């Protein structure tokens, strides 16, 4: 981790970006207090293809287990709680 003041960060910005690209964390300070933290962007996906396939399979299984409502049930639910006024 490297810590630099704002003035130094302005003059060495490209070099600091290169450090971050190499995995280094850079903190920029103003009057000794941290105001910016530069971190490398994750290059790997957060979720793997296997996880995606498993989740989609579970969603398909859930959809297959849901029975469509009968039209009379839908109509009854639509009118539940409505006043006759």
Image: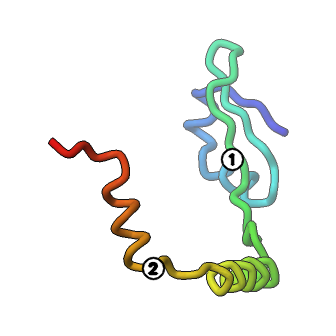
Residue 57 pos. (x, y %): 73, 85
From mark 1 to mark 2, how far is it between C-alphas? 64 Å
Return the mark for residue 72: none
Of 2 and 45, which appears nearest the observer?
45
Above or below — where is 63 with respect to 17? below
Q: Is residue 19 left or right of residue 79?
A: right
**Label 2 crowd (10 A; few <14 / some 14-19 / many >=20):** few
Which image quadrant for residue 65? bottom right
Foreground: disc 1 or disc 2: 2
Instruction: Single out the residue that lies furthest toward the front.
Output: 84
Identified at 59% across, 27% down, the residue is 6
Residue to which mark 2 is pinned: 70
Identified at 20% across, 45% down, the residue is 84
Instruction: Single out the residue that lies furthest toward the right.
Output: 1
Residue 7 pos. (x, y %): 58, 27
Identified at 68% across, 78% down, the residue is 62
**Label 1 crowd (10 A; few <14 / some 14-19 / many >=20):** many
Secondary structure beneath disc 1? helix
Q: Is residue 63 left or right of residue 40?
A: left
In the rendered image, which quarter contains the N terminus?
Answer: top right
Secondary structure beneath disc 2? loop
Residue 28 pos. (x, y %): 67, 30
Above or below — where is 55 with respect to 24? below
Of 10 and 68, which appears nearest the observer?
68
* Nearest to N terminus: mark 1 or mark 2: 1
Identified at 63% across, 32% down, the residue is 36
Return the mark for residue 16: 1
């Amino acid at each position: 981790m490297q810590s630099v003041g704002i003035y130094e960060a302005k003059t060495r910005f490209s070099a600091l970006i290169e450090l971050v690209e190499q995995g280094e964390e850079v903190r920029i300070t103003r009057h000794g207090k941290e105001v910016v933290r530069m971190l490398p962007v994750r290059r790997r996906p957060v979720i793997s293809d296997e996880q995606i396939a498993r989740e989609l399979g579970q969603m398909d299984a859930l959809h297959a287990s849901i029975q469509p409502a009968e039209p009379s049930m839908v109509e009854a639910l639509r009118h539940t709680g409505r006043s006759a006024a």
